[in-house]
Image: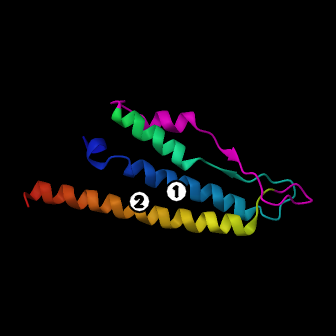
Amino acid sequence: MFDKALGVHPFSLQLRLDRAEIIAGNLANVDTPGFKARDINYKQIMQDVAYNMSNGMNKPYQVAQSGHQLLYRTPYQASADGNTAELNIEQANFAANSMDFQTSLTFMNMKISGLQKAIKGE
C-alpha cells in the first residue's frame, strides 16, 4: 500500500545515496594511479523502476537493483597514470547529485504530508 502511495520516491532517495557513495569513492581516488572512475545510469534505473511499478511487479526495486551494475566513466582528458577520475567532473557530479537528493526528499515530504492530510480528513 505504501509503495503505491509513495511511488518511486523512496527508491530514488536510496539510489541517490548509493550514487553519492560511488562519487565520493571516485573523489577519494582522484590521485590514485590506475584508478577507474565508476558511476551508475540513474535515469535508466529509474525508468526500469517506473516500468516495473506500472506493470504491477511486487518488488520493482529489487528487479532494478539486480539488473544494473556500476559503469566505468570515460574521461574527457586521459591521464598519464591511467586514472579516469577527474576532480572537476567528480565535484560537479557530486554537487548535482546532492541537489537531486534534496529534490527527491522534498517530493517525499510532500507525499507524506498529503497522506497525513488524507488520514486526518483535511
Quadrant location of residue 93?
A: bottom right
Whether residue 61 is in magenta: the answer is: yes
From the viewer's perspective, tell me whether residue 119 is left or right of residue 39. Answer: left
**Residue 61 vertical placement versus 43 (above, below):** above
Residue at the spot 82% in from the left edge and 61% down from the top edge: 77
Q: Is residue 83 left or right of residue 105?
A: right
N-term-proximal mark, 2 vs 1: 1
Residue 102: x and y, percent? 44, 66
Q: Marks 2 and 1: which is nearer the front?
A: 2
Q: How is the image coloured?
A: rainbow
**Residue 41 rendering spot, x and y as whole percentages:** 59, 47
Secondary element under disc 2, as helix, strand or loop, is: helix
Residue for badge 1: 17
Looking at the rendered structure, the kind of residue marked 2 is: Ser
Q: Residue at x 20, y 58 (%)?
A: 114
Q: For the view shown, which residue lies furthest in the right direction?
A: 80
Q: Considering the whole magenta stretch, tell me its main secondary structure.
A: loop
Residue drawn at point x = 54 percent, y = 34 percent: 66
Tell me if residue 91 comes above or below residue 16 in the rendering: below
Q: Residue at x 58, y 68 (%)?
A: 95
**Residue 110 screen position, x and y as percent:** 28, 62
Crowding near pointer 1: few (<14 within 10 Å), some, many (20+)? some
Residue at mark 2: 104
Q: Which residues are magenta?
A: 55-83
Badge 1 marks a residue whose secondary structure is helix
Q: Nearer the viewer, residue 18 or 48?
A: 48
Quadrant in which the C terminus is drawn: bottom left
